[in-house]
Amino acid sequence: MRYLLALPLVLIFLIIPAEGAIIHGTVYSWETLEPLPKAIVTINTTPEQRIVSENGTYSFVVPPGTYIIKAYYYSHGVLELYAEENITIKEEGTFVLDLILFPPLTNISVEEPNIQITLE
């Protein structure tokens, strides 16, 4: 009997979409404009979202707000390429933000995420 009473509540939550937007894109190398597999992409939501893109693509679900998306590409434990983009989401929807990664500038410090890299 309890399950019959809970069923309408569950259906209401499934029917009403959560407020938010999807930000997705591909991470590219500046030299070749080819997708960068294993790039690390972060967005400063609360809590922060972080993914390692398997094939160079990424996707985040976020509420409306202003965010910073950062992408890092490491080779042999050394930061080789970096990108940072600001984005403001004002409404629900799907937004494409491709990132082109460049070598980090030597006179500007890049705040790297706290990531443990193990070489095999």
Image (cartoon, rainbow, N blue to C red):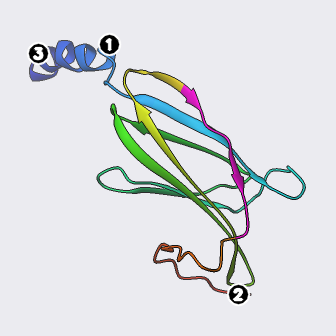
Q: Position of residue 98 (x, y in %)?
A: 67, 41
Q: 6 and 80: which one is in front?
A: 80
User: Decide: marks 3, 1 in contact (CB < 8 A)?
Assistant: no
| Lower sequence index among marks 3 and 1 | 3
- Tell me what residue is drawn at x 90 percent, y 55 percent: 32
Under mark 1, the amino acid is Ile
Where is the C terminus found, in terms of image quarters? bottom right
Q: 120 and 105: which one is in front?
A: 105
Label 3 SS: helix
Q: Residue 5, labelled with which disc?
A: 3
Q: Position of residue 67 (x, y in %)?
A: 40, 45
Mark 2, Cα crowd under 10 Å, few <14 / some 14-19 / many 20+, is few
Q: CA distance from mark 3 to mark 1?
A: 17 Å
Q: How many marks?
A: 3
- Tell me what residue is drawn at x 53 percent, y 73 percent: 110
Q: Position of residue 10 (x, y in %)?
A: 23, 20
Q: Residue 15, labelled with which disc?
A: 1
Q: CA distance from mark 2 to mark 1?
A: 46 Å
Under mark 2, the amino acid is Leu
Mark 3, Cα crowd under 10 Å, few <14 / some 14-19 / many 20+, is few
Q: Report which residue position mark 2 lands on.
A: 119
Q: Which residues are magenta?
A: 95-103
